[in-house]
Image (cartoon, rainbow, N blue to C red):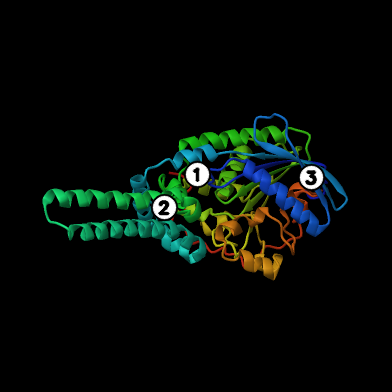
Amino acid sequence: MSSLSKSVTKRRVFYIPGYDPVHPRRYRELYRTESAAQAAVSGYDITLSARQGGERYGWNVKGLIDDADVDASVDVLVWSDIVRDSMKTTIPATYAQLIRTTWVYISTGALWRLMRLRKGPVMAALYPVVMLLVQLALAVCAAVLIYRIGALAGDHWAYRLAIAITAGFAGWGILKWFKRRDGKFFAYYLMHDYAYGAATRGANPPALETRIAAFGDAIAEALQSDVDEVLVVGHSSGAHLGVCVLSDLIRAGRVPAAGPALGFLTLGQVVPMVSFLPGAHRLRADLAFLSVQGALTWVDVTAPGDGCAFALCDPVAVSGVAPEGKRWPLVISAAFTQTLSAARWKELRWRFFRLHFQYLCAFDRPGDYDYFRITAGGQTLAARFKNRAPSKSRIEKPVNRFTSTAP
């Protein structure tokens, strides 16, 4: 049965988070609270239940939506341990990351090309650089001020040395104060995020490649089960991990022709931040490969209101690797200014990080994009969007300098 006509009563959902160090229970709680809010707005029923045992963290969902009774099992494909390990750096090491990462994006010309797509995510990338430099400047200014005030009381070398040491400790204390409170400033977190890809100039580190293979094994197992659809959801950086995972599966012949429908939903993607780097040969090859495959349906959802994503940028086309016969992804907009009420949009407009997660949340004026209908409703991803035209505002012009798909 075609995925366009197949109805869904059982679904496996695999969620790939972005660069996020938190425990996956965060995503369960987000799904629980936001699905209840969306159900109240849209008039359907959806409930969560804990999963007993299993190799991966997840939960079960029961949906009664548009008269379809659906059981969904959601797995989080965890790489937060890799993220946490990459964030275990000292303050000096973080400033060294700042220098290296900035140099990579400027020297390769990637920064200027990314700005030709969307300035929002580039500004988001520059934010930690500016914020960390401001923190350093405040620490230095405080140290200099303390030294100069202290030096007024005497000029003996030993006294001056003591004052200098005191001033140095004061400046260091300011830097430590900022780092301890990075949950409010996000400067260190975002610096580590951008440095992670830049450190290898776009290539996947070995630990990540190992995890991608494990993700593929989990999805391949689900594709051999009796479910009606296997849906892979990649959010933010998880989008380009999903591209690699699914490309590997299809190349290896691990997607059975008579198996469940395979859907790939990318949300708030930041693919160009990596694909525009010179070493991203693997990602560019996978983008080109996946874009012509008939074994899956790939829908890419972004919104211009999300300043952290490359909104409506076709990740294959703008990366300069769109092949003949390209069919994916279907690029559509979540249109926050239309799908959120004026009051809700006003509340969220300047909360950039919260808006980056809006794709996983409830809309008080939902359009044809509804995360909970997609994950717990009775239609496959292919059937739900079979008549959906791509966004007229999508960006497809190739602007990437590096288009090679092999080292």
Q: Nearer the viewer, residue 229 or 292?
A: 229
Q: Marks 3 and 2: which is nearer the front? A: 2
Q: Residue at x 52, y 47 (%)?
A: 283
Q: Nearer the viewer, residue 353 or 230?
A: 353
Mark closer to the chain start, 2 or 1: 2
Q: Position of residue 237 (x, y in %)?
A: 55, 49
Q: Residue at x 46, y 64 (%)?
A: 115
Is the N terminus in the top left, top right, bottom left or bottom right quadrant? top right
Tag 3–tag 1 contact (CB < 8 Å): no
Q: Calculate the distance from the C-alpha at mark 2 to the C-alpha at mark 1.
A: 37 Å
Secondary element under disc 1, as helix, strand or loop, is helix
Q: Position of residue 398 (x, y in %)?
A: 51, 61
Residue picked out by circle 1: 282
Up/down of 268 relative to 259, above or below? below
Mark closer to the chain start, 3 or 2: 3
User: Does the rendering let one see residue 210?
Assistant: yes
Q: Marks 2 and 1: which is nearer the front? A: 2
Residue picked out by circle 2: 178
Left or right of 77 in this view: 130: left
Mark closer to the chain start, 3 or 1: 3
Q: Position of residue 275 (x, y in %)?
A: 49, 52
Q: Residue furthest right?
A: 67
To which quarter of the image does residue 341 belong? bottom right
Q: Marks 3 and 1: which is nearer the front? A: 3
Left or right of 88 in this view: 364: right
